[in-house]
Amino acid sequence: MTGIPKPLPPVLEQSLRRELVTGERLLWSAQPIGKRLKSGFGIWLFAIPWTAFALFWESLALLPWAASTHTPDAFAYSFGIVMPLFGLPFILIGFWMLWKPVREMRLAGSTVFGLTDRRLIRVEEGRKRSVSTVLLDQIGPMDRNEAKDGVGNLRIQTHSSVDSEGDRRTERFEILGVPDVARLERLILENRRARAEAAR
């Protein structure tokens, strides 16, 4: 079954254990399943028309240059430079939105999550090594969704604040596409309770 956690690749296992401090115990670890991160492709419903319109705009902006048979005057020359440059950022944003879910699926192969008796850890191995941690004491409300085989997502609220305009901003630590996600949530709750009881 897909929902049963598989042993970590030795490289990721070693990478995760490098993060443990003296006396810290690893309680749970898993690697996200890349093909189960397809929900990220929902952004394509917006990204495809966005990119198509941006490319259409750019082609219209460049058309006078292609169709012109005479040397443009100063105004036309300036307009012919400014308008294509104006469209470039929108094209780049469109390509970024199209690439984002593909990147997340590829990154899953070099990502590992771990839960210790003190914190949650995410390690991403690549050209640069990226490590994110959240202490158990920082964990707030959690949202879990999962498939029938137990593979799912756990979104954990870690911080909430109000910006200068009065809008509430919420920061989350996301664990996406991991097997047996319900067990992870249960372990977090059990360890938070144990730490609270020990602090009394």
Image: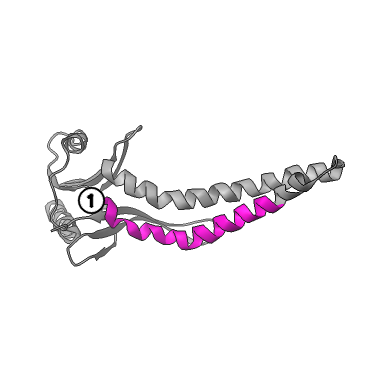
Q: Is residue 18 left or right of residue 97?
A: left
Which of 147/114 is in front? 147
Q: Give the range drawn in magenta.
A: 34-60
Q: Work out which quarter of the rendered image holds the C terminus and state it.
A: bottom left
Query: Is 85 situated above or below 129?
Result: below
Query: Is 10 situated above or below 183?
Result: above
Residue 42 colored magenta?
A: yes
Type of amino acid under label 1: Leu
Q: Kindly state the secondary structure of the residue where label 1 is placed.
A: helix
Looking at the picture, the colour scheme in use is one colour
Asked whether residue 176 appears in the rendered view, the answer is: no
Q: Which residue is the site of mark 1? A: 136
Residue 80 position in % (x across, y down): 76, 45
Q: Which residue is drawn at 58% across and 49% down?
A: 91
Asked whether residue 108 appears in the rendered view, the answer is: yes
Residue 40 colored magenta?
A: yes
- Dominant secondary-structure state across the stretch colored magenta: helix
Q: Which residue is drawn at 48% across and 52% down?
A: 97
Which of 20/45 is in front? 45
Q: Which residue is drawn at 76% across and 44% down?
A: 65
Quadrant in the rendering for residue 191: bottom left
Name the residue at the right extreme: 73
Q: In this view, does 198 lie to the left or right of 69?
A: left
